[in-house]
Amino acid sequence: MSDRDTLFASGLPNEHFVFDEKVAAVFPNMINRSVPGYATIIAMIGTLSAEYAQPASICYDLGCSLGAASLSMRHNIRAENCAIVAVDNSAAMVEGCRQAIERDSAVLPVDVRCEDILDTPVNNASMVVMNFTLQFVKPEARDELLARIYEGLLPGGMLILSEKILFEDSALNDLFIEMYHRFKEQQGYSKLEISRKRAALEKVLIPETIAAHESRLQKAGFETFDVWFQCFNFASIVAVKSH
Ligand code: GEK
């Protein structure tokens, strides 16, 4: 396990949240204490990859951070001659991801790339995972990215899209945010840490409603999609390209 996340406990926080070496050093602790259901989602990405990875295809992990989703796929893919492409534009995350892959015992090849996912070609893909990444991509680039992913998926290929979400009903939105903050307090974050982190993420993490995500998926070409996991304002959607 990584160091405990106390980045917002004291001192002056970054004006805007950045995925630097300080964040990378505490990231597993941070994300497990900040995303309800994260461990379940990571485990189920592995379960889905056992079923959906196709022989001689590529499984993409876009916005891989330290490679948790890649490792989960790597230990569960049964199809032959697959490879994983793991991409992140934070040098500190990519370095940590490379080390985690080196320490890992599985043999499936993982190509870890430091680049913007907006520049990553997606080809011959049977799985594409964006586990809490699209929310950090500028909104005007999201439609094209999803359309490219759809084009690069093989028939029967799967996209897993996990996001922090908004609700149209403002009372429900407020309730889930409040419950989420209670969850973070239960995880040992103070009210001050929670509000500082929220402020730092404000212009960096731009959530959308499930309806907005589903309409984008439809526009990209997907006919089959639904939410498979949700806890408060965090959800994960699967979308499958038709045969
Ligand atoms: C996990 N998926 O553990 N190009 C490449 N990487 C990006 C971009 C971009 N345009 N924008 C953001 N990132 C991981 C967790 S974290 C989620 C993903 C979170 C990267 C960013 O550097 C960071 O590592 C990751 O996306 C988001 O399953 O921290 O809430």
Image (cartoon, rainbow, N blue to C red):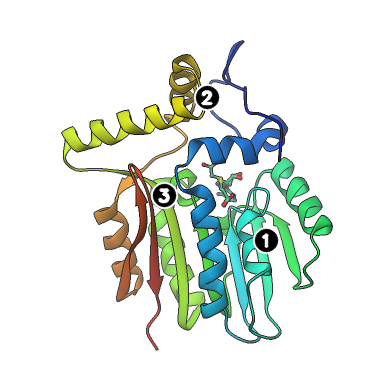
Residue identifier under label 1? 71
Q: Position of residue 111 (x, y in %)?
A: 74, 65
User: In the figure, is residue 71 to the left or right of 239?
Assistant: right
Residue identifier under label 3? 163
Q: Position of residue 189 (x, y in %)?
A: 51, 23
The quarter holding residue 72 reads bottom right
Q: Residue at x 79, y 60 (%)?
A: 104
Q: Is mark 2 within 8 Å of ligand 1?
A: no
User: In the figure, is residue 179 to the left or right of 199?
Assistant: left
Residue 49 seen anywhere in this rendered image of the structure: yes
Alpha carbon separation for disc pair 2 and 3: 23 Å
Instruction: Look at the image and tell me in which quarter the C terminus lies.
Output: bottom left
Residue identifier under label 2? 188
Label located before the other in sequence (1 or 2)? 1
Tag 1 near tag 2, CB within 8 Å: no
Residue type pointed to by label 3: Glu
Instruction: Look at the image and tell me in which quarter the N terminus lies.
Output: top right
**Nearer the camera: disc 3 or disc 1:** 1
Residue type pointed to by label 1: Leu
Residue type pointed to by label 2: Gly
Q: Residues within 10 Å of mark 1 (few under 14, many from 20)?
A: many
Q: Position of residue 227 (x, y in %)?
A: 33, 61
Label located before the other in sequence (2 or 3)? 3
Q: Residue at x 55, y 29 (%)?
A: 17
